[in-house]
């Protein structure tokens, strides 16, 4: 199995990851009912975010924390939701990639989930 190398690899991750999230009834309502996600518009933004974080390409300028605080104001994002999010993220990465970048993206996801939970609790 290869490591994450390109934005196409990242697209595969976010596409497969969101398929899992949207099928999981414990968390899908956040994306469908609360955020009303337009997945075809959202996936390229996520690729840019992860490309900046993992491949160092730059280009993501949104405030990730504020986006999630705004969602939390509509529907409380619980620790269980973050666990579910991480489970599906890790599973997606592990099903498709192996190597330094694959481990880096999982570590980064855990850091993001941890920071967001701290910010939400404040």
Image (cartoon, rainbow, N blue to C red):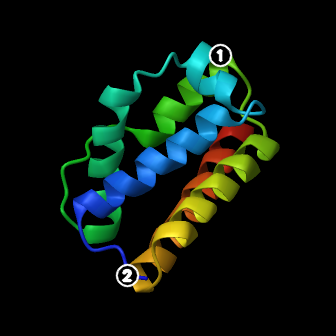
Q: Is 91 situated left or right of 10 in this image?
A: right
Residue drawn at (65%, 48%) of the image: 85
Between the residue at mark 1 and the residue at mark 2, the CA separation in whole angstroms equals 39 Å
Disc on the earlier residue, 1 or 2: 2
Give the percent coordinates (x, y) of residue 91: 62, 63
Task: Answer with left or right where residue 65 lies relative to residue 118.
Answer: left
Q: Position of residue 94 (x, y in %)?
A: 56, 71
**Dot 1 surroundings within 10 Å: few (below 14), some, or many (20 or more)?**
few
**Disc 1 target residue:** 74
Classify mark 2: residues with Cα within 10 Å, few (<14), some (14-19) or many (20+): few
Picture coordinates of residue 56, whole percent (x, y): 23, 68
Which quadrant, please, contains the C terminus? top right
Residue at 37% from the left image edge and 55% from the top image edge: 12
Q: Which mark is residue 2?
A: 2
Q: Which mark is residue 61?
A: none
Position of residue 11 in the picture relative to residue 96 (left or right): left
Q: Secondary structure at mark 1?
A: helix
Where 80 falls versus 12 (above or below)?
above
Location of residue 42 (image quadrant): top left
Name the quadrant of the N terminus.
Answer: bottom left
Q: Is residue 52 visible?
A: no
Which residue: 25% across, 58% down? Answer: 8
In the image, is residue 13 above or below residue 24? below
Placement of 120 over or under 36, stated as above or below:
below
Determine if residue 37 is in view.
Answer: yes
Q: Where is residue 83 shown, x and y percent of the image?
A: 75, 52
- Rendered residue at 60%/33% (across/down): 22
């Amino acid at each position: 199995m290869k490591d994450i190398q390109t934005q196409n690899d990242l697209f595969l991750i976010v596409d497969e990851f969101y398929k899992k999230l949207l099928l999981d009834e414990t968390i899908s309502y956040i994306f469908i009912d609360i955020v009303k996600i337009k997945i075809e518009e959202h996936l390229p933004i996520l690729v840019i975010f992860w490309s900046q974080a993992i491949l160092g390409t730059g280009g993501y300028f949104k405030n990730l924390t504020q986006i999630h605080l705004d969602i939390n104001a509509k529907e409380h994002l619980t620790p269980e939701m973050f666990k579910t999010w991480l489970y599906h993220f890790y599973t997606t990465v592990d099903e498709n990639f192996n190597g330094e970048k694959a481990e880096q993206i999982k570590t980064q996801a855990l850091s993001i989930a941890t920071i967001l939970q701290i910010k939400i609790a404040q």
